[in-house]
Amino acid sequence: MTNDIQQVLISEEQLQARISQLAEQISREYAGKDPIFVGVLKGVVMFFGDFVKRVTTHCQIDFMWISSYHGTDSTGSMIVKRDVSENIKGRHVVILEDIFDTGNSLDFTYKHLLSKEPASLKICTLLDKPERRNPNVTLQPDYTGFVIPNAFVVGYGLDFNEHYRNLPYVGVLKPEAYEK
Ligand code: IMP
Ligand code: MG
């Protein structure tokens, strides 16, 4: 499996160091606010676990699962497959995501959660690929782990055809791996 990786873009050590910084910053900014961290499945799993265990303020966790609905048009509208279970009205919510790419899925998630009237709503993404942004998406992440170039990455939760999520680092696949 690791033979399929052409280049390690972000090592395990780099991921852990940056996630510690993010958790420290967010713990400071949300101290006493009892925030709810909402993870967007499935890509966020690794980041989510490593992040929340370093948060030092009182907090809660929740999860959402969204998926693109491929109907007759190819615009890929989104549906909520699994909604948050907590009542987030009046609460301070931080969305955690694996990657901000075109921004379409976070735009959808953000609007969905905003309609539930949280006291505040922010976005924390591990990776940001600004070159790929849909020009209609004006939303920006409030907290970013790493800005990466326009390459398809796998590992640390991110998949290609549901594989490679278990790698402890973020890497770029060899071209021949796409044929598997
Ligand atoms: P969006 O394009 O910002 O809506 O991102 C949608 C989803 O596509 C992300 O949450 C990821 O699950 C997936 N995605 C985007 N870029 C990559 C990548 O480079 N590798 C793996 N998954 C990706
Ligand atoms: Mg995702």
Image: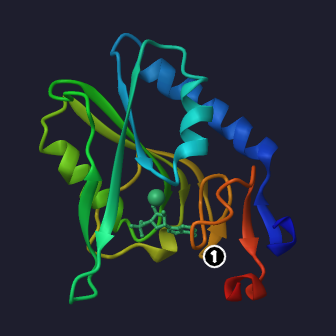
Residue drawn at x 35%, y 23% is 35
Rendered image coloring scheme = rainbow
| Relative image position of residue 125 (x, y in whole percent) | 49, 49
Give the number of marks: 1
Task: Determine if residue 22 is in view.
Answer: no
Residue drawn at x 59%, y 60% is 158
| Relative image position of residue 49 (x, y in whole percent) | 58, 34
Q: Is residue 177 above or below residue 60?
A: below
On the image, which quarter does residue 127 sit in?
A: bottom right
Q: Secondary structure at mark 1?
A: loop
Residue drawn at x 31%, y 32% is 93
Task: Give the camera-side residue of 6 and 82.
Answer: 82
Task: Determine if residue 172 is in view.
Answer: yes
Q: Is residue 174 above or below residue 106?
A: below
Q: Quadrant of the C terminus?
A: bottom right
The three-letter code of the residue at mark 1 reads Ala
Residue located farthest toward the right when viewing the structure as drawn = 3
Q: Quadrant of the N terminus?
A: bottom right
Q: Mark 1: is the Cβ under 8 angstroms from ligand 1?
A: yes
The crowding category of the residue bearing disc 1, from other C-alpha atoms within 10 Å (few below 14, some 14 to 19, many at least 20), is few
| Relative image position of residue 149 (x, y in whole percent) | 63, 71
| Relative image position of residue 25 (x, y in whole percent) | 53, 27
Q: Which residue is mark 1?
A: 151
Task: Give the camera-side residue of 165 and 128.
Answer: 165
